[in-house]
């Protein structure tokens, strides 16, 4: 009998080791504060100027933003950390449109993770090369508008512009209630001044800093940040724990 109990203990322990993902891998079980939606990727380059592609700029600044937000004490997730198309991971939606599958995958990830806010990073383009500056698109909620207003003001100071946040009611990524979300159009790739800012490493750091400062101001005003975050136990982890306690 003792041998049987010992074997069960070992088997249960091995099951836990195999089944329980590490903290960095367990996205659905971690209380993330912020999800950074890195726009485009893979076959979808986004807008471009010569050999400059939006997807690359978005990722470069997203990684810098991730580092700054993490250093500020937030728990942050990137929905892509390399040049991939998220539509390739979407095998659950029966839709012929790669674009729709991509957007659906991004929104579904936000639903699964359940962050306290989502920042969708993009680069703008205009037929007029004089058009410049960041533009923030927001949901039709007070929380999203407040976040957009703070981000807009912070980026306006950086770029010397006077843009106003815009309600993005037609944008797929904003049509949900999972968390306050905004689309951050960080500048116009069609404008020489913005283009230099979007591609220069030091300027990219300043963009990330301006976004981080706005996020921190939003947290102070809204009280949304949890001071302590711990991995939530799933039902099977509790079950295995209870089984081990009884042995």
Image (tube, rainbow, N blue to C red):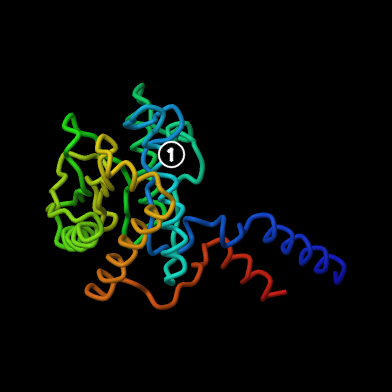
Q: Quadrant of the C terminus?
A: bottom right
Which quadrant would the N terminus be assigned to in this image? bottom right
Name the one closer to the observer, 52 or 12.
52
Image vertical order of residue 74 relative to residue 102, above or below: below
Lateral position of residue 155 relative to residue 70, left or right: left
The residue sitting at 27% across, 44% down in the picture is: 193
Give the residue drawn at x 47%, y 31%: 88
Extreme-right residue of the structure: 3
Q: Is residue 173 left or right of residue 64?
A: left
What's the residue at 67%, 61% (across, down)? 16
The residue to which callout 1 is attached is 56
Residue 28 position in % (x across, y down): 47, 56
Instruction: List x then y, in percent, for residue 98.
Output: 37, 26
Q: Is residue 202 above or below residue 3?
A: above
Neighbourhood count class around disc 1 (C-alpha, 10 Å): few under 14, some 14–19, many 20 upward: many
Q: Residue furthest top?
A: 96
Instruction: Give the left or right position of residue 78, taking residue 212 as reference.
Output: right
Q: Nearer the viewer, residue 189 or 39?
A: 189
Instruction: Please provide percent x and percent y for residue 21.
Output: 61, 57
Give the quarter of the image for residue 4.
bottom right
Percent position of residue 71, x then y: 46, 69
Number of dots carrying numbers: 1
Nearer-the-camera pick, 146 or 5: 146
Depth check, front residue: 198 or 14: 198
């Amino acid at each position: 009998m003792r041998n049987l109990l010992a074997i069960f203990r070992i088997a249960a322990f091995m099951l836990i080791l195999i089944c329980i993902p590490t903290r960095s891998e367990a996205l659905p079980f971690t209380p993330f504060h912020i999800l950074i939606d890195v726009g485009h990727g893979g076959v979808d380059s986004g807008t471009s100027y010569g050999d400059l592609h939006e997807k690359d700029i978005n990722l470069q600044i997203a990684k810098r933003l991730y580092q700054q937000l993490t250093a500020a004490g937030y728990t942050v997730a990137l929905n892509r950390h390399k040049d991939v198309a998220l539509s390739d991971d979407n095998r659950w939606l029966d839709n012929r449109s790669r674009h729709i599958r991509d957007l659906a995958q991004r929104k579904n990830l936000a639903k699964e993770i359940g962050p306290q806010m989502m920042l969708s990073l993009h680069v703008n383009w205009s037929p007029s090369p004089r058009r410049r500056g960041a533009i923030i698109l927001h949901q039709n909620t007070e929380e999203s508008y407040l976040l957009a207003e703070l981000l807009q003001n912070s980026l306006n100071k950086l770029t010397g512009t006077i843009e106003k946040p815009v309600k993005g009611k037609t944008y797929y990524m904003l049509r949900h209630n999972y968390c306050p979300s905004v689309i951050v159009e960080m500048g116009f790739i069609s404008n020489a001044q913005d283009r230099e800012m979007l591609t220069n490493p030091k300027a990219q750091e300043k963009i990330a800093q301006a976004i981080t400062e706005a996020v921190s101001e939003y947290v102070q005003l809204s009280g949304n940040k949890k001071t302590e975050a711990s991995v939530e136990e799933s039902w099977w982890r509790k079950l295995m724990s209870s089984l081990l306690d009884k042995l």
